[in-house]
Amino acid sequence: MARKNPGIQKPTPRKASSTRKVAPNIKKQKSAFRADTLIVVLLLAALIGFAFYISREKKNTNTETISTSAVTTFVFNDSDGIPNSIEIKPAAEDAQPVKVARGAKNVWALELPIKTEADQGLAEAAASQISALQIISTVPADADPAVFGFDASTFVISIGFVDGKTHILEIGDVTPTKSGYYVRLDKTKIMIVNPNGIDALTKLVSSPPYLNTPTPSALPPSETPVLPTDAVATPDLSVTPTP
């Protein structure tokens, strides 16, 4: 009969409870690590997005500045030359047209409403206004001109240049925001023009650039009509009145 060896002992198995206590701690550490990593990734993405936004805004600002400066245009440019005559015709029947012209000696003279010397400073300022008429925006070519007041333009400005060309500007209605006038160039192009230059030009109708304001001449005295002697009625004395 075999005897049991008392020197050999079976290994004591580990308790399952000790393993169960360690597993939750490991899971908590992994979850905390993943949460921290996710927060860092989100913050990094936010910083990258913010940097991209700032860069794009700066680029857009620069683009807008360049496009604005590039869009600034004028009704007439250097290729048109220098104005040497300006005639402004108002639509109002009680207003007279005004015309100034540059002579051979580069001296401005007033031709309408009367021929006389012109104030050189005022006439030259009007020519400068012609060259500085700034276009705010343009109107589509297929637009109805009557909608903008060109069926009865308030003013028609004829500008002559040194090269012999003449351009016609029709002044229509003021824009709804009062930021400019609708202006038509040579019966074709309709645009919105800065009001300052237009107002300065049309003001010449009410205040022509006289060098010396002319004084109205006195009317000649009217003669008293003298009736002929045969036209004077004389009483007939031969008729005896009936009592």
Image (spheres, grey):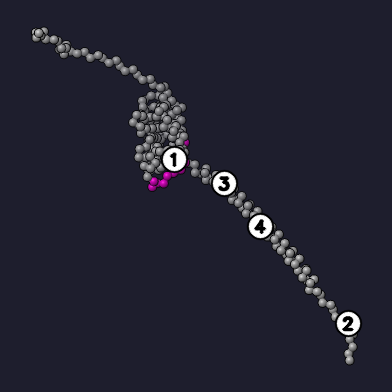
Label 4 to label 3: alpha-carbon separation: 28 Å
Tag 1, which secondary structure? loop
Q: Residue at x 58, y 49 (%)?
A: 57
Q: Give the range drawn in magenta.
A: 131-143
Apparent side of residue 49 relative to residue 233 in the rendered image (left or right): right
- Front one among 52 and 86: 52
Residue that carries the numbered disc 1 in the rendered image: 176
Looking at the rendered image, the quarter that the C terminus falls into is top left
Residue that carries the numbered disc 3 in the rendered image: 61
Question: Hey, which residue is sitting farthest right in the picture?
Answer: 7
Give the mark nearer the N terminus: 1 vs 3: 3
- Front one among 15 and 132: 15
Q: Quadrant of residue 208?
A: top left
Tag 4, which secondary structure? helix
Label 4 amino acid? Leu
Residue that carries the numbered disc 4 in the rendered image: 42
Res. 226 mark: none
Camera-near label (3 vs 2) is 2
